[in-house]
Amino acid sequence: MAGVAPIAKLVRTSLARNTPKRIFLALLLSLLQNDPVSDNELVETLLELPRTHAHSVQLEYALEFAASALDNARTFFRLLPRLLPASQCRYLTSIKNTYDTLFKEHLLCEFVAVFLPKLTADVEARVAAALPPSADVKSVWSRLMFLYRVVAQQHGHLVGDGADGAGLVRGSRHAGFSVTYVKKTLLLIAAHNEDREQKNGLAKAPAAAEPTYALNCNAKKYAVYLRVKKAAWLAARFRTWAFHEQLLEQFAAYFQLHVQSPAAALREFVGVFFTGFVLAAALAERPYVLFNWKNYLVSWLPGALRTFRPLALAGLTEDLGDVLIAAVMLHTVPEITATTVGGARTPYDLRKKFLRSCIYLQIVTLEQFARAFPDDARAMSQAHITHEMEQLSQVDKITHEFNATLAHVNPQFTLFEESKLIDYFVSFPASSCEYLAAQQTRLAALVENFVGSAIRERNNERLARLLLALLNALSTANLVFFCAKRGPWLVLDPVIQYLDQEPFNADAADCGFQDMYASFGMIMCSVISIACFFGVNFTDVTVSLSYSVDYINRFFYCLADMLTGAFAGSDDDDRTIVANYDYLVADWVAALFDVNNDGLSDELLKSVNIKQIYK
């Protein structure tokens, strides 16, 4: 294959081996970073689809490239009109069916508002320049109009003023396409724009709330649909760690809560969190998702309600505590009243925990709580609540306990079991931090600082101890990641960089290389475990030349179908290195299966660096 461009080799080899599209994308981006490719090469090798059965796989490769980044999407849509009409038709048909899942939120807006109108203008110019247009050109235009209709129906509010109505009509006339069909598409876009303007007007001048009457069955169905949609909107954020301080404001703006009365909006808002928790439990969401729902409800939502401006709580005509209790008491399903989310050994009532957090923040009074749960209120007194509030305010206590069990413990003199680190982490969620976001935030900051300190000191033992403790106390790990803006990447990002950058070489005079190998394995296993427990999909991560991500994708996710048992090598040095490793691995295997041998010798172990074994 001498003289063949590297990108052509990559595409040809990937098609022959049916390489997964995410692995192909990682290889392609790595190639483009090291060896830029011209537009002509990209068109000829990747974007132009062959007239064989492999075109569907190559189409997936090209669309995966387009959806990977804004610059790549811009390149794809700029080059799309240069392809043969048959290839354009295949792309447009596939995009019509998958664009809303193919492009992420920011790319979706760019696609609808920028790329699609620009593509339409380019195609319209080609139609006008080829009068009378050929059958192939007409086919491209018709598929483009079908795509425009689907976008107008589902995301017409994103098109805005980007649609050139005159150009769409003019191009349809030139291509012999139904002008009536195009005009209906433009009416859909206009309707979305008008609805958006009306909502903006309501936002600027809130109108008096009017009651909604269930006049028919359809109205009831629509009300149920709205509740599920709101819960699904929140669920997506709890599932992907996309919640933060502005979550309430975004929710209120998206669902137009400001047009309701403050009391009605508050009841609906609190209710949708409980509804979402029930739906998540019914759908058997992963444990970390359920924990995120529960922790936000108990630890963060009560405090956020006090400063939640979109609900205009200052304009409440009813007492805030009464409104909250009325909203909470509507939920009596077992998923709420007897849940064990968070590792609880005995079931608990989520409503009581939420209201108790409200009591600590002085949103709900003890008397109001007693009217809802008289039996529980008998065991509580104002003095008891005051004492617990004093305990909650002792945020510095978290720092002292963390330092005493981990930060100030020397691994050389204190065994891991003696430090009681796992016991401390296991007991943490059951402590007062359950009701106070400040203590959770402090613990997350301590963990982040400790990870950075251990990595700077290259202290593998200290880093491994923390990771081991987190994995033995998943609820505490969930608390830490909940309070981090990046979720599990609070730990994964620096640890992966450390694994990639640290050579983990075993010095010939180093007698403790077994500890180094063990620490490496423990840290790598911790990365994999955190990814599995907390919903991190490394197959969606593209990191150029990352040993850790590459290792996890190829071996843990079993995406190593591009690897082979032979390596020709580009020069004599490469062939010599591979031959040496073949010889050493053969010695490894012989020693492992030799019944007369006690195991691998230290010299043989150190002969192959742990990060190079899989190569």
Image (cartoon, rainbow, N blue to C red):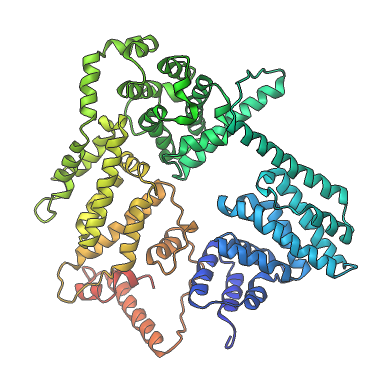
- Residue 376 at x, y percent in the picture: 32, 13
Location of residue 27 in the rendering, given as x and y in whole percent from the top left corner: 51, 70
Residue 574 found in image quarter: bottom left
> Is residue 412 left or right of 183 when viewed as pictured?
left
Residue 219 in the figure: left or right of residue 232: right
| Residue displayed at 38% across by 82% down | 578
Q: Is residue 515 above or below residue 613?
A: above
Q: Residue furthest bottom?
A: 572
Taking the view exactly as shown, the residue that stands out farthest to the front is 205
Res. 90 in view: yes
Q: Is residue 207 above or below residue 284?
A: above
Residue 538 in picture, x, y percent from top left: 45, 57
Q: Is residue 313 above or below residue 476?
A: above
Residue drawn at x 61%, y 24% is 207
Q: Position of residue 569 (x, y in %)?
A: 45, 84
Task: Out of 251 and 420, give the one closest to the viewer.
Answer: 251
Q: Quadrant of the C terminus?
A: bottom left
Q: Quadrant of the N terminus?
A: bottom right
Residue in the image at 43% along x and 34% along y: 293
| In the displayed structure image, the side of residue 193 where residue 103 appears, left or right | left
